[in-house]
Structures are given as C-alpha cells and as structure tokens.
Image (cartoon, rainbow, N blue to C red):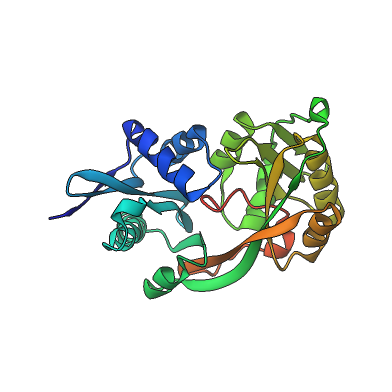
Amino acid sequence: MSIRLRTLRNEDFVFANKLREIAGWNQTLNDWQRFISLSPDGCFVVEWKGEVAGTATTTCYGQDLAWIGMVLVHPDFRRRGLGQALLEHCIHHLREVKKIRCVKLDATPEGLPLYEKLGFNAEWSLKRWVGHGGGNTENCPHDEITDKALALDRSIFAADRSLLLKSLVQGGMASRVQADASFGLMRPGMAATYLGALSPANENSGLAIARELIDCAPKDLVFWDLPDINQAATQLAKDLNFEAKRDLQRMYLGDNKQAGDPRRMFGISEPGLG
C-alpha cells in the first residue's frame, strides 16, 4: 500500500518541526516532546511510499475526553487522502482502543469540511488575538500550580488535565496562581509568546491575570486564543490593542455531556491541546 501509519518517534521531530514551520504554527520542539510524553502511543505519522508525509497527535484527559491536534501534511503530499487517513487513525485509536467518550479538536476553516465529513459537530467559535507584550519581563511571576487551581480548571474545562498543566508550568515563562485558585500561564513559542491556559474563579481575576502576564511578556508578539462568547476577555484584548487574526471552531465527536464552559475560559492551552 502507498499509505502507512505508525507512531511518531523522536527522530521524526526534525520533519515534524519543518511541517510546523511551513504551516506558520507556534509550537516548539519542546511542545513536540510534550505531545509524546503525554501520549506515547497516541501520536502518529503517515508515510507515502516510504516517505514521512504528515503528523497528528492525540492527548487523553481521562476516559471522558481526548484531543486531536497537529494534523499537518507536507505540501508535496497533499490531495492523496493523507489528512483523512491520519484523522481516521486518531479517531480509531481514541474511540475503539482507548474507549474515550468524546473527542474534540479546534478546526481551522480549511480543515472544517473534512472534520464535518468525519462526523464532528460544531460546539463554539474562538479567535486568535495577536498583540505585543509590555516588556516588563523582570516582573514575571513563577507560582507553583496548586491542587485547588487544578480543581478549578476541571470545573471549567470539564476534564482533568493536571499532567498537561504541570508540564506547561515547568516549561513556561510565567505562571500566576491567586489565593482564589485562579491561574494563568505563559510560555515561549516559535512565532510568539503564548498566553494560556487561563482559568479564573471569576471575571475580575481572569482580567487581572491576563493584564499581568501580558505586561510581563517580551515586547514581541503575543498570541491569545479566546472563545468568542467570553465578551469580557475579548474586550480586554481590544482594549490592549490586540487584533483578531485567526478564526477557529471547537468541534466534538461522541458524547459531549460534560462540555466545558467557554464563558469562563480566559485563554485556552493551545489549539493542539484544548
């Protein structure tokens, strides 16, 4: 057969990072390592006639929820059904092997028709807001994430992603955890500093953490992905002269009875992870 699917390995990182570069995405080599660390048997490459041609990752948050991300096919190998083959392989792995109840992803407009074809349903829309940091990097907080903060995140995200969040803190640029358990994270990316995840106990805490982290970010670009329904966070992005640059659609496949609450999400962790 011309198409072969196999597990993503460390030696594939150079190719995977090249794909990311071609797509203009923000992930780093550390992010690729994080995907494998969180899901050693759930990250894949597709080969076309023996040549590595594309990637996809999956991340499980318990039995209730899993995420598909980093679905990329090299331009030289497109229009051969490789993206669909990767997605079908991910879905089979998650639904049939791992027995996950609900699978989600954040779809670009280009990928939306394929996801709909495979049975994914639209849940809510989000945008990437792009601005600049304040440059006060010496004031960046470095708080340890607490059990209360992780519990708060579970109530907002509707699944346990403690391992992911702890990993993001370890490799991050800043982390703020307030007394009310509200928290926000910031980390480096290839194209921009990334703000998120940000899960607050209330609107005021969410806005305060966002302002603090943006102020201490380098003066280079900052990416901030926000649900459209979160009007308070969106208004803050506008007030800070951020511009909406990218539309995404959160989608789900399966039983979505434990849906998260986008009104309380003041920053997702990234489109590849939820």
Q: Which residue is drawn at 39% across and 41% down?
A: 16
Please, which residue is most extreme toward the top here?
A: 138
User: Could you tell me residue 2's position as x and y percent?
Assistant: 16, 54
Query: Does residue 178 appear in the picture of this structure?
Result: no
Q: Which residue is drawn at 52% across and 36% down?
A: 28
User: Could you tell me residue 55's position as x and y percent?
Assistant: 36, 48
Pick the residue in front: 251 or 199: 251
Pick the residue in front: 112 or 76: 76
Looking at the rendering, in which quadrant would you find the N terminus?
Answer: bottom left
Q: How many discs mark residues in the rendered view?
A: 0
User: Could you tell me residue 86's position as x and y percent?
Assistant: 32, 56
Q: Which residue is drawn at 70% across and 31% down?
A: 144
In the figure, is residue 8 to the left or right of 180? left
In the figure, is residue 133 to the left or right of 96? right
- Does 99 appear above or below 124? above
In the figure, is residue 223 to the left or right of 84? right
